[in-house]
Amino acid sequence: MRKPKKSLNRISDKTTLLLKFNYVSSFLSLAIGLICTYAFDIHGTIPYVFFFYSASNLLNVLAFRKHKNLMAMAIYTSIISFLGTVVITLYSGGINSPFIFVLGLVVLAGYISTRWFGTIYLYLIISTIVSIYLIDYVDFDFIENEVPENVRDLFSLISVLFSVYLLGGVFGKNLLSTHHRLYRSKARIEKSIDEKENLLREVHHRVKNNLQTVSSLLSLQARNTPNEQIKALVRSSQNRVTSMAMIHEMLYVRDNLSKIEFGSYVNELSQYLLRTVERNDQKIKVNLNIPETLLSIDTAIPLGLLINETVTNSIKYGFKDRNEGEIKIELEKRDQDCYILKISDDGLGFALDHDYKNYNTLGLRLIHNLARQLQGSIDRIPSKKGTKYKLVFQDITDQFNP
C-alpha cells in the first residue's frame, strides 16, 4: 500500500533535516576537537568526546543508507548528542559552561523522530540541566573544568558559534524553507478551491437554467392543448421542476455551495405555489415555523418535492370550495441529523376512516416515495379539521439516489 503524498513529503523533510544536522554537527565536532587539542591544549575528556561524536554520527548516517529507518537514525542521533553534550558540559564548567545551550538543540533533534519521543526528551533534558546544577552545588572532586583558564573565553566563543550555526544554519534555514513551501502549497490549494467553487457555482447556474428551460417547455405544452386535465398534469410537473430549479438558484447566489438554508427555500417555494396554484378569489396564508437550518442538497431536493406535493394538494383540494385558509409548515430538530417536519392545513381533509395510503394518485405515491428517499417515514395525524402530515427524516449527506 502506497503512502499518501503528504506523508511522503513529511518524511522527506525530516530525512533532509536530520541528515544535514548529522553532517554539519559531525564536521563541526571534528573541527572543534582539533582546535581543543592543538590550539587550546586540552588533552582530557572533551576532545575525545568531540572525536567520538563525529565518528559515531557519521557511522550512524552510513547505517541509515542501508536500513533506511529514519526513526532509528533519529533516536541514535538524539542519544549520542545528549550524552556527548552532557559530558562536555560537565567537564567545561558545569552549569556555567556555554556548551550547555547545545542541549536545547538536542531537544529539536528529538522532535525529528516522533512527537512523543521529543516530549520525553524535553523533560529529560530539563531534569538533566537541574542535575548539572546540583552536581555543581555539591562540588564533586572528580569532575574538573578541563578548559585552561586562559582559553575559556575562546572556548565560550566557539561553543556559542557552534550553537548559533546549528540553530540558524540547520534548523532555522530548514524551517524557513519548509514554511515557504507550505505557503506556496497553501496558495495553490486556495486557488484550486476557488476555481472549483466557481466551476461548481457555474454548474448550479446551468442546471437552474436547464430546469427553467424545461419548465418553459412544459408551460408551452400546457397552453397548446385544449384538454384541461392534461393542462393540470403538465402544470404539476412544471411546479416540480421549478422546486428543483429554486435549489440550484439558491446555491448559485449564496456563498455556501453545499448547504441550503431551508427556511428561505420553503418560503420562496410556498410563495411560488400560492402564485401559480391559488385561484384569484382565494386568500390562503402560509405560516412557517422553521429555525435556521442548513440541509444538504441531497436532502433539500426530495424534501422540496414533498413540500410541493403536500402544499399543492392543500391548495387544490383542501380549500376547493373555500376562499380562505391557512397552511402551516414546522420543522423540529430531534437529533444531530434527524428532523421532524409537520405540514398541516385547516381545509377539508380526509375522512377519519379513510386509508389515505391506498390513494392511487401520483401526488400521494410521490410523497411516500420521497419520504423513503429521505430515510424516513410520513404519517397522517388524525384531525377533525384539515390534513396534518408528520415526516421524520434524515439529513442525507451522500449522493442523491433517485
Image (cartoon, helix red, strand yellow):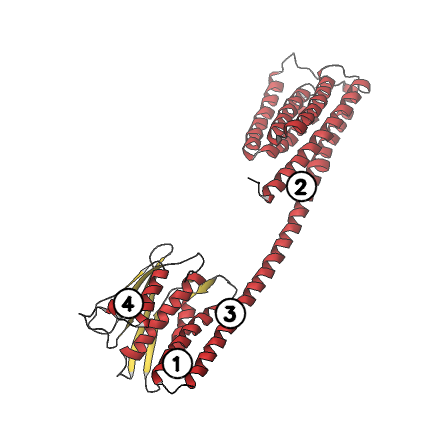
Task: Tell me the quarter of the picture where residue 121 sits.
Answer: top right
Residues marked 4 and 2 touching at CB (< 8 Å): no
Q: Nearer the viewer, mark 2 or mark 3?
A: 3
- Residue 226 position, x and y percent, is 38, 87
According to the image, label 4 marks what residue? 389
Number of the label disc, if any, that sits on residue 175: 2
Q: Is residue 320 visible?
A: yes
Q: Earlier in the sequence, mark 2 or mark 3?
A: 2
Q: Residues within 10 Å of mark 2 (few under 14, many from 20)?
A: some
How far from the left and from the top, in percent, is residue 76?
62, 25
Q: Is residue 332 above or below residue 214?
A: above
Residue 397 spot, x, y in % from top left: 43, 57
Instruction: Answer above or below: position of 174 versus 390.
Output: above
Residue type of the residue flagged with mark 3: Val
The quadrant where residue 241 appears: bottom left
Residue identified by numbered label 1: 276
Question: Viewer-nearest of labels 1 and 2?
Answer: 1
